[in-house]
Amino acid sequence: MSSRREPECTQQRLIVKDDGTVILLLGVGAVGKTTFVNSAAAKEALEVNHTLSSHGLNVNHYTVPHPDSKRAFVFIDPPGFDHSTVSDKVVMKTIIDWMKNACSPDAHFGGIVYLHNINADRFPAKNASKFQIERLSHPGLTSRTVIATAKWGLVNQEHKSSAELHATELKKYWEILSGRGARVGRFDNTKASAWDIVDTLLSGQEPLKLNVVQEELDRIHSSLLEKRKQKRSKGGFFSFLFRLFG
């Protein structure tokens, strides 16, 4: 019988600092967030812990021990952005509400791992209603962020060189975040690469207070709403002029 410690689910109570360091996984849908946790846990299929939000979206969390230090990490796996039925602002609100309701104020936040599909045929779209990782600006949070290319297993030998070129281009694209302390890495579906990313994330840094993270996510959520409102307001004004003088 294997002596390997299985991932634990602790949704019956609030996540506190003694439960482990919280890592938030972000990215578009099906980018490989759950695969990241599976790889870190060296287990093909984790037992999923569901937390149902008011929007009917699931936020999952898994407790996984570090393979060397045995330090516990709580990986948060929320719905992906670019969702098929709801906007990014709803996804962001789901994440914010979950953190407020499921995490104790004393929970230790380690950082963000943002996964990006290396096979995407374009750079992340600039859109006022879409979440982009570049929206992060708080130095305490950007310095605790790793942007990792993912889905390398889908790159065949014929397209490997173009994928490597794209990875280099993406690194330049994310220079604005790198200038704020973020790091760029690669997740290749292995246990080693998953923990390399986590180790890079926490290298030389103490966990961040949860309220700092919540305030930054609240700010981003508000900016998404404001830009949508401004767009509607502008359209309404010109429609009014058209009706008045048309």
Image: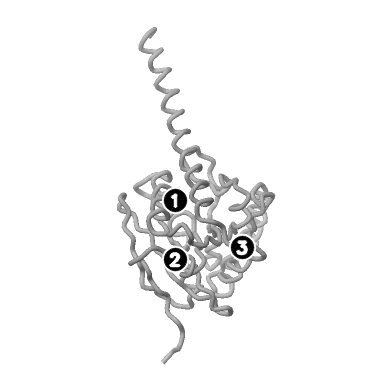
- Of all residues shown, which one is farthest toward the bottom? 1
Q: Residues within 10 Å of mark 2 (few under 14, many from 20)?
A: many
Can you tell which of label 3 and label 2 is closer to the viewer?
A: 3
Q: Separation of disc 2 and disc 1 at Cα?
A: 14 Å
Q: Separation of disc 1 and disc 3 at Cα?
A: 28 Å
Name the secondary structure under disc 3.
Answer: loop
**Circle on res. 246:** none
Q: Please name the residue that numbered disc 1 is placed on.
A: 81
Q: Nearer the viewer, residue 182 or 139?
A: 139
Task: Identify the amino acid type marked 3.
Answer: Glu
- Discs 3, 2 touching: Cβ within 8 Å: no
Name the secondary structure under disc 2.
Answer: helix
- Of all residues shown, which one is farthest toward the front? 106
Residue 240: quarter of image: top left
Q: Please name the residue that numbered disc 3 is placed on.
A: 206
The residue sitting at 33% across, 63% down in the picture is 50
Task: Identify the amino acid type marked 1.
Answer: Phe
**Circle on res. 34:** 2
